[in-house]
Amino acid sequence: MIDYICGKLITKLPTYIMIDVNGVGYGLHIPLSTYARLGEVEGTQEIYTYLYVRDDAMQLYGFVSREEKELFELLLSVTGVGPRMALGILSTLSVDEFRQAVNSEDVSLLTTVPGIGRKTGERLLLELRDKIGVSIPEPVTGKIAKVAADSARDAISALMSLGCKPQEAARAIRTARKHLPEGCSLEELIREALKHL
């Protein structure tokens, strides 16, 4: 398995790149999100890779971040989703936007991806809702962001231990945060979230 490569970026197109690693040119299919974050041609480029093997082909896919690669692999685990559709999703939605759509069961956001209708969107929600990490909405900056994220994560875990599904817990925490002042305690956050389940 080729997990990662680093070399000179030779070709840079919106959906395809070539990287020269010690005289060997690796051609990789990429999402638009990766293209937007690539360096200049002739510069050194690091890329996380995924080797897709079929009976009639071997294709290499590339991603600037590990999170994109992990989401790509997760998408391939969904019935009826192949590499082309997975790239389409990553080209349309960021990793955080996709997680948020799954956690909030937002089928309409998923159907903004070309080639994904309501039925496929619902299948993505059904098969991924328990696999995808709960994302923390409405990010803030600096130390406050870390405290808020840790607090929300702990609150979501607490609600899940009470029997809530991850997406229900995330939704309740989002709503609770709108009703509470910044810097509220974990206990206050959980108590308020319980009112919105």
Image (cartoon, grey):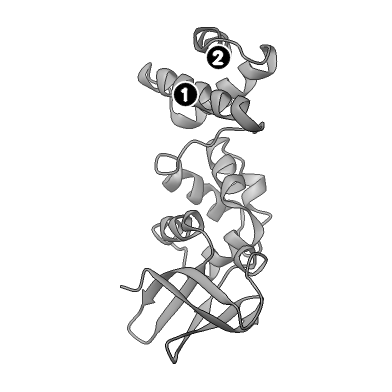
Image coordinates for residue 173, horizontal then vertical, percent: 56, 21
Image coordinates for residue 165, horizontal then vertical, percent: 43, 28
Q: Is residue 104 above or below residue 54?
A: above
Q: Would residue 37 be found to the left or right of residue 50 on screen?
A: right
Residue for badge 2: 193
Instruction: Characterize the local packing of mark 2: few (<14), some (14-19) or many (20 or more) Cα atoms within 10 angstroms.
Output: many
Q: In this view, does 187 lie above or below 4?
A: above
Q: Is residue 6 above or below residue 101?
A: below
**Residue at 60% over, 66% down:** 34
Residue for badge 1: 156
**Residue at 49% over, 69% down:** 47
- Closer to the camera, 151 or 59? 151
Which corner quadrant of the image does residue 13 belong to? Answer: bottom right
Which corner quadrant of the image does residue 177 belong to? Answer: top right
Label 1 is placed on what type of residue? Ile
- Closer to the camera, 146 or 16? 146
Label 2 is placed on what type of residue? Ala
Q: Earlier in the sequence, mark 2 or mark 1?
A: 1
Q: Which quadrant would the N terminus be assigned to in this image?
A: bottom left
Total number of numbered discs in the rendering: 2
Image coordinates for residue 121, horizontal then vertical, percent: 56, 51
- Closer to the camera, 179 or 149? 149
SS class, disc 1: helix
| Labelled pair 2, 1 in contact (Cβ < 8 Å) | no
Query: Marks 2 and 1, Cα distance to the nearest angstrom?
Result: 9 Å
Q: Would residue 57 be found to the left or right of residue 146 on screen?
A: left
SS class, disc 2: helix
Image coordinates for residue 141, horizontal then vertical, percent: 66, 33
Q: Would residue 44 be found to the left or right of residue 182 on screen?
A: left
**Residue at 56% over, 33% down:** 136
Instruction: Characterize the local packing of mark 1: few (<14), some (14-19) or many (20 or more) Cα atoms within 10 angstroms.
Output: many
